[in-house]
Amino acid sequence: MKHNHNHDNAPETGLVKVLFEFTDPTAHAVCIAGTFNRWQPEAKTLHSSGEGNWWKETALPPGVYEYCLVVDGQWRTDPRARESVANPFGGRNSILRVATSVESAQLEDAANLPLKNANLNQNKKI
């Protein structure tokens, strides 16, 4: 999923546009169920753009949400989600973090990047 960080396109109500994307060439129906829609998959049906590509744009208030994709009736985690947590049914829920600002979203993205330090392989002499 992707956050739309262009504030010109974001609603004025403090909601943040979020794009969910999923690919499965064998899927016939894909929905999203989560804490943002009271776990009702029919409330957020993804659109097919052909060749197994599915998408849904929605607007959510900033916060942290749990959700699952429901693919042809089967509940599963989102393969694009960076985080997941155990659920009470023995499976896992994906985590979606909706940032309050562009800066906090960029900081969150940066926190997930691997760091490289050129000095790690050099021995320092004191």
Image (spheres, helix red, strand yellow):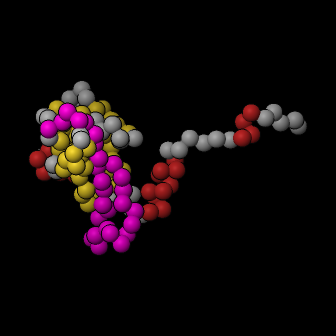
* Residue 76 x/y as whole percent: 24, 34
* Residue 112 x/y as whole percent: 50, 44
- Does residue 114 show up? yes
Residue 100 highlighted magenta (yes or no):
no
75 or 6, which lies in front?
A: 6
Which residue does the image show at 25% across and 29% down from the upper left? 91
Which residue does the image show at 44% across and 63% down from the upper left? 102
* Residue 32 x/y as whole percent: 20, 45
Q: Is residue 63 left or right of residue 49?
A: right
Report the span colored magenta: 1-28
Residue 9 highlighted magenta (yes or no):
yes
Give the residue furthest to the right: 126
User: In the picture shown, does residue 31 fall above or below 122?
Assistant: below
- Does residue 68 show up? no
Give the residue furthest to the top: 90
For the C terminus, the quadrant is top right
User: Which of the 4 image quadrants contains residue 12?
Assistant: bottom left
User: In the picture shown, does residue 14 fall above or below 56?
Assistant: below
Which residue does the image show at 53% across and 44% down from the upper left? 113
63 or 1, which lies in front?
A: 1
> Magenta part mainly helix, strand or loop?
loop
